[in-house]
């Protein structure tokens, strides 16, 4: 069963009050959602029927390790991750990832790297077609 989604207003308030907030010049948020177009169609051009749901699960321990690792990257001072689970419908959120870093290039790179690590190594997604 999908989890209730977090409030980005609350996340940002928490981030700005965190221990290292004074070192952060930028916070970025990634919100991945279920889309109706199949991954293989978007990435490889394969014809697929529309996606109705995604069965989603993740390695919680691996995610915690990835967060800890991200906090060791140059200029990264804040990381927060929320992952949904279960049968998710089109338009529902799969994940939120927030990064706080000192400068824009490091923040963008950290967000890209952490989301990539999570998506490529720590989640299982199975598309269910119409």
Image (spheres, rainbow, N blue to C red):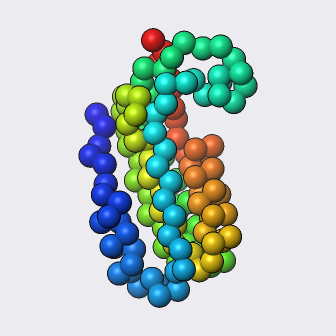
Q: Relative to the observer, which residue lies in front, 69 or 90?
A: 90
Q: Quadrant of residue 7?
A: bottom left
Q: Is residue 21 above or below residue 32?
A: below
For the question of whether residue 72 can be seen, the reply is no
Residue found farthest to the right: 44
Q: Position of residue 117 (x, y in %)?
A: 62, 51
Q: Is residue 15 above or below residue 35?
A: below
Which residue lies at the image location 57% right of the left edge and 23% below the top edge?
38
Which residue lies at the image location 52% right of the left edge and 80% below the top edge?
24
Quarter placement of the C terminus: top left
Q: Position of residue 123 (x, y in %)?
A: 52, 41
Q: Position of residue 32 (x, y in %)?
A: 49, 44
Q: How many marks?
A: 0
For the question of whether residue 31 can be seen, the reply is yes
Q: Relative to the observer, which residue lies in front, 73 or 49?
A: 49
Q: Quadrant of residue 84?
A: top left
Q: Position of residue 77 (x, y in %)?
A: 53, 77
Which residue lies at the image location 69% right of the left edge and 17% below the top edge?
46
Is residue 70 left or right of 18 when viewed as pictured? right
Quarter placement of the N terminus: top left
Which residue lies at the image location 65% right of the left edge and 28% below the top edge?
42
């Amino acid at each position: 069963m999908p989890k209730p989604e977090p409030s980005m207003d609350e996340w940002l308030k928490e981030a700005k009050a965190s221990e290292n907030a004074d070192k952060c010049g930028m916070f970025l948020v990634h919100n991945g959602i279920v889309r109706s177009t199949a991954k293989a169609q978007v990435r490889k051009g394969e014809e697929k029927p529309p996606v109705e749901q995604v069965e989603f699960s993740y390695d919680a321990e691996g995610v915690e390790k990835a967060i800890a690792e991200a906090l060791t990257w140059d200029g990264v001072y804040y990381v927060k991750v929320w992952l949904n689970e279960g049968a998710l419908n089109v338009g529902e959120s799969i994940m939120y990832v927030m990064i706080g870093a000192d400068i824009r290039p490091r923040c963008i790179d950290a967000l890209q790297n952490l989301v990539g690590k999570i998506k490529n190594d720590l989640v299982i997604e199975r598309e269910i077609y119409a």
